[in-house]
Image: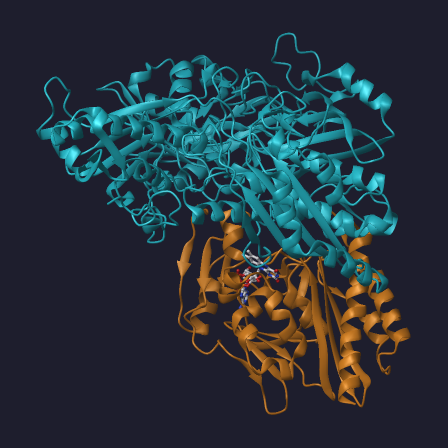
Chain colours: A orange, B cyan
Amino acid sequence: MYPSRFQYEAPTTLAEAIAILAANDDAKVLAGGQSLIPMMKLRFASPATLVDINNIPGLDFHGADADGTYRIGALCRHAHLEKSTTLAEHQPLLASCAPLVADPIVRTRGTFVGSVCHADPQGDWASCMVALDGSITAVGPNGKRSIPVKEFVAGPFTTVLAKDEIAIEGVIAPAKGTRAGGYLKLERRVGDFATAGVAIALDMSGGVVTNAGIGLTGVGAQTVDAADAAAALIGSSLDPDAIEQAATLAAEVSKPRSDHRGSASYKRHIVSTFVTRILGNVQRAEMQVA
Amino acid sequence: MALDEVKIGGLGASRRRVEDNRFIRGKGNYVDDVVLPGMLYMEILRSPLAHAKINSIDTSAAYAIPGVRMVMTGEMMAARNLAWMPTLSYDTQAVLATDKVRFQGQEVCAVIADDPYIARDGVEAIIVDYEPLPPIVNPEQAMAADAPLIRNDKVGQDNNVIFDWEVGDREGTDRAFAEADKVSEISMHYPRSHPSPIEACGSIADYDRSTSKLTVYMTSQAPHIVRAAVSLVAEIPEHMIRIIAPDLGGGFGNKVPVYPGYVISILASILLEKPVKWIEDKTGNLISTGFGRDVYLKGEMALRNDGKILGVRMHTDSDHGAFFSDAQPSKFKIGLMHSTFACYDVPSAHLTARGVYTNKAPGGVAYRCSFRVTEAMYFQERMVQAAADDLGMDQAEFRRVNLVKDDDFPKRTPFGFLTDSGQYEKCLQIGLDAIGYDDFKKEQEEARKRGRLLGIGISTMTEPLGAGNSREYDILGIKMFDSAELRVHMTGKAILRTGAKTQGQGHETTWAQIVAHELGIPAEDIIVEEGDTDTAPFGMGTYASRSTPVAGAAVSMVSRKIRAKARKIAAHLLEVSDEDIEWELGRFYVRGAQDRGVTIQECAMAAYSNVPDGMEPGLENNAYYDPPNLTWPFACYIATVEVDPETGVWDVLRLVAVDDCGVRINPMIVEGQIMGGLTEAYAMANMQFITFDEDGNCVGSNYMDYLLPTAWETPGFELHEVVTPCPHHPIGAKGIGECATVGGPAAFVNAVMDALKHTGVRNIDMPLLPDRVYEAVQTGNDISGMPPVKTTDE
Ligand SMILES: Cc1cc2nc3c(=O)[nH]c(=O)nc-3n(C[C@H](O)[C@H](O)[C@H](O)COP(=O)(O)OP(=O)(O)OC[C@H]3O[C@@H](n4cnc5c(N)ncnc54)[C@H](O)[C@@H]3O)c2cc1C
């Protein structure tokens, strides 16, 4: 690869990294590099300075706090989540998404937080975070702040992070009841971005939905928050009517492009099919428990 | 005692590939691995537009970058009469654009710099003023009355048609259709695809003023043709040109043509008197170099109610891009498309073919097929399935009725080729038994009652491999024979060189096996070298599955010449006359006294130390082989699939392959070839294509959009074999490198179409993407894949 010239920095503390970002115009954080480096290779991105955060200790974690709050550090790789033995019990949606992100090679380097920061409308993790109503913790010269994911993305490939802020973790609030849900993605081949993807997170209590979120991948200029579709599920026990209504509303809120991956109407149909399938799976699992 | 042939690595030995030793250790030597002292780097500026007039080119900012040595433009090339070059199909192709650009990705300028980064910086600094013209991306647009003229550079070209060609028996076919009980019709598009070798194209040109010699390291499947072409185009004497094709990271036809990048790097090296390296990136490779396919078919079949095919009529419209640079034998216009229906008994057939220019990359190469045989066999097998369906006949039974019978050989095909051997019905039956045909059909019926869509698809075909005999086959007038040169050293070890060029086929392994078979020298004692025109004998290169049929035959023949001389030496050593000498593998002995003998190694030593009076010393020779005919392998591929009607996604349940490629030199390599080919066939059917949008932008210009299948989604394959030796090949072998790519796609597509039979859909164009399948299920309509693809936001 032959990118434009750039300065490479590899700080070992967050403070140092933030200082370098603050001091340089057009500097970019380098995490797993699985989105940034391909763009630099094609010269779609030509940052003047790269701030590699891979040598900063303490960012490589994921797990639940005592109260059930789930945290995923900035250097937690897709593969760590895929291979995690505890993720499924806490966050079934993330566990079902992990093996569908990119391909095995990319997953060993790419990071969860980096994916959300990349703000690609075809990013799988962002849909999960929207469905889970998660947030990103950012650190800058003036300290920490928490940004809800639904406000984090400002547009395709842009976030509200200041130029000297680093996202250090993704945070997901504890479930009200039991967490359920899942991810389905239509891809043309392993490692392909989604033609359409659906992330559903549910909190269930006694077979009834107490909280719901639906995020859609690849069917809009940014990750789609299918809030109305999710709202239609709350209070229901995932009966066929509720599922159908959610599927219809999710399809309606999608704004896909017609392109070589399929027509807009096809992608909408996939959204509604996947909403139906995921909810059907959850409902059947609930029946088994009951 | 005669040697055990398999033990010495002769015919039939599944010997490990000797070349893999260096490949798996990362010690291969590809063009990009070669570094010459003082080498400069070249990068090409490509057109962002599909069709545009060039008003001006400003290179001053590029020249201002430190480390930029030279910026080459079309004007500079024109001053040396090199702005255009001849193609392999008697057309011309722009080297660097002068007047206008005719496809997205066309070469416009080249920057030569001290390092590849600076070269790219230089390319970014060039300012080109383009005036956009309307782009043409399919034959319909090309032939429209008001279509803009793409090739306004050509005197006498007043439309976008390249050729109108016909072959076959028009009247006879008309009569067959008049007599038919039923006529089956189907139309389809075989989409544009790209061979996409993992190693893209590249060259290092090294012109040495002091010796006047030009050495070019080049990614070429046919280095000798390149030497001839460079000599003609650049007017450098042929003996002053040395083309070296080192290890190649795949070719599949993509590395047959001569590309502008090669020519520009050569001129740059001559002008700068420095080695100049050009290594194309993946996008450059995908958008500008030899593609495959892009042919539209209108097919009709005249049928009798009992299933007999009476006649076939085909019309093809082919999209060749901006320059007609197909790599194909000179005599034919649309490759060997007319080899279609060779395995069936078809009394009469007629094919009309029209080729057009479009604003797309040129270079209809045979992507892993013998000159458009892939399209020929795909069209054939799709027409066969449609015909069986139209007659309400079982597709296996329909084939049984029409396949050429074992006793009918030699048999003229409907378009005049001569097939010579095969056991077609046997192969079909092995395939049907392996897949459990009758059981699957029951299962399919049961599943359908529960809303599940299962399908089974068959593809049977014989294809013409190994072009070819000198009466009919030439490229730019050069006859398509091949060569081998064998030198046996005094200790019985040997070096073999051929005019072919391996690029993954395993020649270094299999050629040694042929020598081992002929001479009894263990394969491990033979080194094989190819690709250097200063050392290798002249040959036409490796493509179209021609290496084993032609170069491989030459290897046999040269080994036999060596054996003939060794026999004389043996007679001398054993003090008997030639006629009293018998041969068993690796050894001559005296007739009637088997224990009195000498080994081939002893003969080799004697060739350098003790030759009979009057005999030339040494033990080396060469052979040129002009094959009497093509070879005709047969294949039967059967796929079963399940289609998800809600999403259009389809999964392969099983794929059974029965291949008859005659005698197998190295069964393991043959199986590897078949599996690789089936993988590509699956890719064609499922995901892989290059299309264009309304503006002529190439969709498929990188590996996110041009999908190569990985081990993850590629289904497993079950392989079976039948051996019908080729009657005219010295060791009975037939080509195999491409059978599965050629015959495979129709098996997958036929299976999906079978699953959708109840919908009345007759065709979905490849690739059978989920959205296409879903739309077909929903609407019951055929789905066209013709570009432009529409991209719209709602
Ligand atoms: C072949 C291939 C296939 C892929 N397929 C998929 C797929 O199917 N689905 C999918 O979702 N993704 C896919 N990806 C993208 C992949 O998931 C990336 O890993 C991910 O998008 C980015 O994570 P990263 O750690 O690699 O980030 P990087 O590439 O390092 O960075 C991406 C962007 O985020 C910024 N950034 C990263 N980390 C931080 C941080 N901590 N704070 C502030 N800014 C930060 C960077 O500055 C940059 O702008 C694919 C990538 C490849 C190469």
The C terminus of chain A - image quarter = bottom right
Q: Residue at x 43, y 42 (%)?
A: B504
Numbered disc total: 0
Residue ranking furthest to the right: A241
Q: Is residue A38 left or right of residue A251?
A: left
Q: Nearer the viewer, residue B483 or B400?
A: B400
Residue B199 in view, yes or no: yes
**Above/below status of A154 relative to B115:** below
Q: Which x, y percent locates residue B549?
A: 45, 31
Q: Nearer the viewer, residue B452 or B53?
A: B452
**Above/below status of A204 relative to B600:** below
In the picture, residue B39 is in which quadrant? top left
Q: Is residue B109 left or right of residue B753?
A: left
Q: Which x, y percent locates residue B221?
A: 43, 32
Q: Is residue A116 left or right of residue A238?
A: left
Residue A260 in view, yes or no: no
Q: Is residue B627 left or right of residue B486?
A: right
**Above/below status of B760 relative to A128:** above
Q: Which x, y percent locates residue B616?
A: 15, 20
Q: Residue at x 45, y 21 (%)?
A: B480
Q: Residue at x 54, y 51 (%)?
A: A39
Residue ranking furthest to the top: B156
Residue ranking furthest to the front: B592
Q: Which x, y percent locates residue B348?
A: 73, 22
Ligand 1 shown in quarter: bottom right
In the picture, residue B37 is in which quadrant? top left
